[in-house]
Image: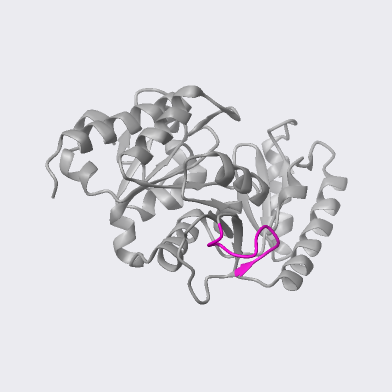
Amino acid sequence: MEPLSLLTPDAARALAGVIFDLDDTVLDHGALTEAAYGALFRLREAGLTLIACTGRPAGWGEVLQRQWPIDATIAENGAVALVRGQARPSAGAGHQRGLARSADDGRVALLDGMNREARRARRAELVALADDVVRRFPAAALADDNEQRVTDVTIDIGEHRQVPPEDVQKMRAELRERGVRTLLSSVHLHLTRDPSDKATGVVRLLSTRFGEDPTRARYRYAFVGDSGNDGVAFAAFALTFGVANVRAHLGKLSVPPRFVASLPMGRGFAEIAHRITELRKNAPAP
């Protein structure tokens, strides 16, 4: 890992866009600060495509697409994407479920590779499994954002409740035995049967909706994250950044971020954005 001061003008100038996690990267314990919000506008004004990438539900992604200066949102750990405005349509890009008729009419569209009926059946099965788990582990409970989710189900283990780590491990072991894939964030245990992760979800969207070559996209877009839940993305993209609080999670990362800010959370994101935009402003065009 290196300090931000070692990021070169050439590297900043070569970027086509920035992908970023939400919780504890742009958000400070769930709150959006003025510094982080302003940083998004500065990156957008510098000509960069901006993509939020989160385990949070599709319902959050719809709000982000309506209110934030971003081009797309990858939600539910890569399983679905949300776009708004003139994103280029592509055959096979996925089924648009309910939030809009078209991705080209200025409204928000949810892109999901599974049709509506099959998705509902798969999720109903996951809800039943989650209900069974929380009945037997009373320290846990279903998370309060589940009604906004499309593909997965989340159990609250650290957002409004504190579940002992040994109980979390027992829950994960039981779910694996039932053929359910689990993803662990700092606040939620996610239950899913989708194979996607944040990195593959982003690359798929860049390819199908923005016309990027899947291999080149990993070099043209930077990723910003904060924890072990971002490990796949840190490994997938060539240029990666961590806000300062990522240091507490280095033991969970096989590939750490290349550059680390001196400040945590939203202030760290603003620090990274400032460095990128200043270098792009002062560097000669390639």
Could you tell me how many numbered marks the image carries? 0
Q: Is residue 253 magenta?
A: no
Is 185 left, or right, of 221 in this rendering?
right
User: Vertical placement of 187 versus 265: above or below?
Assistant: below
* Quadrant placement of the N terminus: top left
Region of the chain picked out in magenta, as a range: 95-105
Nearest the eye: 51 or 88 = 88
Q: Residue at x 83, y 46 (%)?
A: 134
Identify which residue is drawn at 84% across, 52% down. 131
Task: Tell me if residue 10 can be seen.
Answer: yes
The residue located at (21%, 44%) in the rendering is 13
Q: Left of 245 or right of it: where is 186?
A: right
Image x and y of residue 121, in percent: 79, 69
Instruction: Give the colour scheme shown.
Output: one colour
Would residue 153 be found to the left or right of residue 238 on screen?
right
Residue under the point 60% across and 37% down: 186
Locate residue 26, reporting x and y percent: 49, 33
Q: From this viewpoint, is residue 243 visible?
A: no
Toward the right, the furthest residue is: 135
Q: Is residue 284 above or below residue 121?
A: above
Q: Is residue 102 magenta?
A: yes
266 and 44: which is toward the camera: 44
What is the x, y in percent for residue 260? 33, 32
Q: Which picture quadrant has residue 41?
A: top left
**Residue 28 at what x, y percent from top left?**
54, 26
Q: Main secondary structure of the magenta part?
A: loop
Q: Residue furthest bottom?
A: 91
